Image: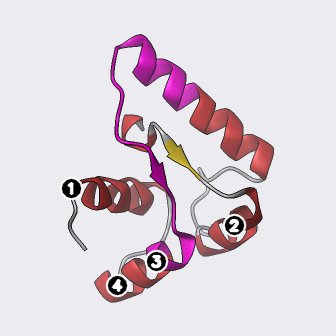
Amino acid sequence: MRDLSDVSLKPSDFATLAELCRQDRGFPADLDGWLTMIGRVNNDAHQRALYLEPLLLDVKDFGSWCVRLDIAPGLDALRAYVIIKRRGVS
């Protein structure tokens, strides 16, 4: 999960992301759950002195990326997307 460290999401985009990831049972049910999960990930990473490049999640691009690669949107796909974006790959 540490790949999601320092990832932010516009609160207004959460509903769209949740809809994309609706098949992932591990995906947080609401914005508070998302914020709690990301807070836990950030705390864990920062305690280990791991600071990653901040990334504002582009939900529309994430959805398009999943379609292009024919993968199911969810936390695993989101982690892969974030890794790729941080490395500057489309």
In the rendered image, which quarter contains the N terminus? top left
Q: Which mark is residue 43?
A: none
Tell me, yes or no, whether the two marked residues, 2 and 1, touch with CB atoms within 8 Å: no
Tell me, yes or no, whether the two marked residues, 4 and 3, touch with CB atoms within 8 Å: no
Which quarter of the figure has residue 49?
top left
Q: Which residues are magenta?
A: 40-62
Disc 2 and disc 1: Cα gap in Å?
Answer: 23 Å
Residue count near mark 1 (Cα–Cα under 10 Å), binned few <14, some 14–19, many ≥20 = few
Identify which residue is drawn at 59% across, 50% down.
Answer: 26
Question: Which residue carries the number 1 mark?
Answer: 87
Camera-nearest label, 1 or 4: 1
Given the image, on which type of amino acid does mark 1 rest? Arg
Tell me, yes or no, whether the two marked residues, 2 and 3, touch with CB atoms within 8 Å: no
Question: Which residue carries the number 4 mark?
Answer: 70
Q: Residue furthest top?
A: 47
Given the image, on which type of amino acid does mark 2 rest? Asp
Residue count near mark 3 (Cα–Cα under 10 Å), binned few <14, some 14–19, many ≥20 = few
Question: Which residue carries the number 2 mark?
Answer: 13
Q: Which mark is residue 61?
A: 3
**Which tag, 1 or 4, sits closer to the chain's start?**
4
The spot of residue 58 in percent (x, y) is: 51, 68
Looking at the rendered structure, the secondary structure element under dot 3 is: helix
Camera-nearest label, 4 or 3: 3
